[in-house]
Image (cartoon, rainbow, N blue to C red):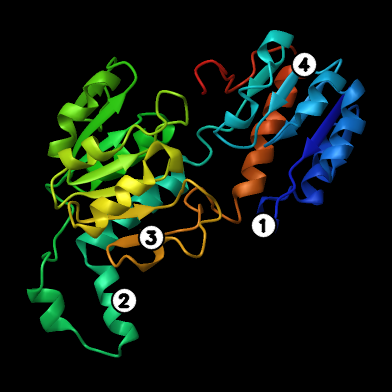
Amino acid sequence: MKVVLYSEHWNGFWCLPPEMVNRLQTDFPEIEFCHARTEQQIIEFISNAEIYFGYIFPRAAVEAAEHLKWIHVPAASVHPLSSLGLEQKGIVITNSKGLHAGPISEHVMGCMLVFSRKFLESWQYQQEHHYAAREILTEPPPVGELRGKTVLILGLGSIGLEVARLSKAFGMRVLAVKKYAEGQYESVDRLFGAGEFRSVLPEADYLVITVPQTPATEGMIGEAELHSLKNSCVLINVARGTVVQQDALIRALKEHRIRGAALDVFEREPLPSNSELYSLLNVFLTPHTSGVSALEHWPRMMELFAENLRRYISKQPLLNIVNLQEGY
């Protein structure tokens, strides 16, 4: 049995460490592991491989992959694979959903605190060497707390559920939206279906976006939705940049129709240096790092892949099987 692995990126952090491949080879000596370093090597290695591990799969490799049965994506999003016709070829797709729930939910809570405790303003005054107690305490918006505030979570997967749990621990009122408003969740006060989300936008003090990228979610937050938010609301996007119409968001931020935004994802990544988002004082930007827990990231990823390898070998059901039509 042969496995091809590929994870090369301009940012070295996202490159698969060779020692992880070596560990797999030690744990599974009966399997041949090929660590591709270029897309051309994927095509060369894939012809007699059963399994592929990687964020992307070149279109040219689809025809070459005559024996491919399973692709594992070391991320939650499988969007790059959606148009390759893999399901028609009977190839099973699994992803790494759930592995990022811990760091992302902590990141979201940190973003809420940035705004409730006025950390952005304090940091800006710090750069001026100014002890700004008068300004911080008297200029709007007021310093506040999370207790008693309402968070609206769009997307109640593993990340949304963990955000709900932590928000409830802070004493917040938790509203959530999922595709179908089914089930009961201890940390959710009210659950809404996807078709109802616009009606509850005005209740949000914090709007947290954790939906997967699908045709149904692209651009779901635009001018009309932003107008529905109260001007004290903070938008937090840790999903995908295309879920929010970025130009509409920038206008809402510049006109102070919402209090602010914490953005970890963008329509274009890396975010261009001339983006207006960099200069807006009511925006907190992070470079798509919300899902990273650096010391745990690759070991955790390989642990999931190794468990699925064991299941594949023993013909047990794989974890995290994806429906490419649904996008998750």
Q: Whole-Å distance between the Cαs marked 1 and 2?
A: 28 Å
Residue that label 1 marks: 11
User: Which three-letter amino acid code belongs to the residue tagged 3?
Assistant: Leu
With respect to residue 30, does 208 lie above or below? below
Of the residues tagged 4 and 1, which is closer to the observer?
1
Tag shown at residue 69: 4
Q: Disc 4 or 1, which lies upstream in sequence?
A: 1
Residue 6, by quadrant, is top right
Residue that label 3 marks: 277
Q: Secondary structure at mark 2?
A: helix
Q: Secondary structure at mark 3?
A: helix
**Mark 2 neighbour class, 10 Å CA radius: few under 14, some 14 to 19, many 20 or more:** few
Q: Whole-Å distance between the Cαs marked 3 and 2?
A: 17 Å
User: Is 176 or 293 nearer to us in this picture?
Assistant: 176
Tag shown at residue 123: 2
Q: Which residue is outermost to the left?
A: 138
> Where's residue 45, x and y in %?
90, 31
Residue at horizontal 45 percent and vertical 44 percent from the top? 102
Q: Whole-Å distance between the Cαs marked 4 and 1?
A: 29 Å
Q: Whole-Å distance between the Cαs marked 4 and 2?
A: 52 Å
Q: Disc 4 or 2, which lies upstream in sequence?
A: 4
